[in-house]
Image (cartoon, helix red, strand yellow):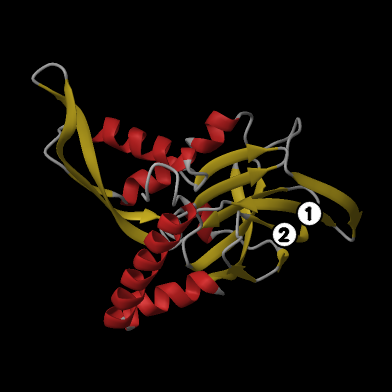
Amino acid sequence: MCFTGHPEFIQASMPVKITVQPDQILMGASYDGTDISVSGEIPEDSEALIRVIGHTEDSRLKKKGQALGFLWMNLGSVEFHKVPSVFLLYWSKGDNAFFHSVQEAWQSPDLGLEAIKKQVDIVSDYEDKEALFEEFIKLKQKSGLYGAAEGRIRYKEENKGMKSFSCSLRLPSGLPQGVYKVEVFAVKEGGIAGYSVKEIRARQAGMPSLIASLAFNHGTLYGILAVLVAVIAGLLTGVMFKGEKGAH
């Protein structure tokens, strides 16, 4: 938890109650992203900010550029260490919003990209690490694994100093397997007044799970089956196109 050292975080003591449904995501062959529901209660004089953050991982990418003035090719590798696999921010929209713009939320030093930048370690011969980090974030945003969305949280009735909230969050199709934290911050007057967290688990199921199990746990059998599938596919293709200028 890279935010526990922040003074405002340590002082957070106001009650926050949350419920996340479902708490388990099964990713089968037809998985194309899914929605989860987050609801709960926060103090009536605060606002909710929801963050979905994945496990930290190392990411190795190739840096492309021009060689000889006209050839685009790989010019080296870039390694990003200790970056979250998923990083999504959601908050309400209104006059008293903690953030007044998507950009402000995205660049927040406590809850946004600046917090990631403090912990990430970039290994590359390229000197401009700032530019590399920005390109990495753009790549993650394009895949839907990183992002910020305003106006997604809805508030309901207030009761005994607390108000209810609800939010539907969209998780991307490229979601990796693993455990994810769904964090809810009660923010007030520019600071974090309360905090709560729930975990959800994403795992493969059905055919993707079977294929992954064969590939990692039964390599020989997986190789044999892959060859058989390729041979059968070739034979079927030959039968289908027989007589049309010869088999292919």
Category of crowding for the residue at label 2, using alpha-carbon neighbours closer than 10 angstroms: few (below 14), some (14–19), many (at least 20): many
The foreground one among 162 and 229 is: 229
> In this rendering, does residue 196 appear at all?
yes
Label count reads 2
> Which residue ends up furthest to the front in the rendered image?
243
> In this rendering, does residue 111 appear at all?
no
Q: Is residue 103 left or right of residue 58?
A: right
Q: Secondary structure at mark 1?
A: strand
Q: Is 235 drawn above or below residue 128 in the view shown?
A: below
Q: Position of residue 133 (x, y in %)?
A: 31, 38
Q: Secondary structure at mark 2?
A: strand
The foreground one among 29 and 243 is: 243
Q: Which mark is residue 166?
A: 1
Category of crowding for the residue at label 1, using alpha-carbon neighbours closer than 10 angstroms: few (below 14), some (14–19), many (at least 20): some
- Sequence-first tag of 1 and 2: 2
Q: Is 238 drawn above or below residue 227 in the view shown?
A: above
Q: Position of residue 109 (x, y in %)?
A: 45, 41
Rendered residue at 65%/41% (across/down): 189
| Residue under numbered circle 2 | 38
Q: Is residue 111 left or right of residue 227?
A: right
Q: Position of residue 53 (x, y in %)?
A: 51, 57
The foreground one among 26 and 15 is: 26
Q: Quadrant of the N terminus?
A: bottom left
Rendered residue at 44%/48% (across/down): 243
Three-letter amino acid code of the residue under disc 1:
Ser
Three-letter amino acid code of the residue under disc 2:
Val
CB atoms of marks 1 and 2 within 8 Å: yes
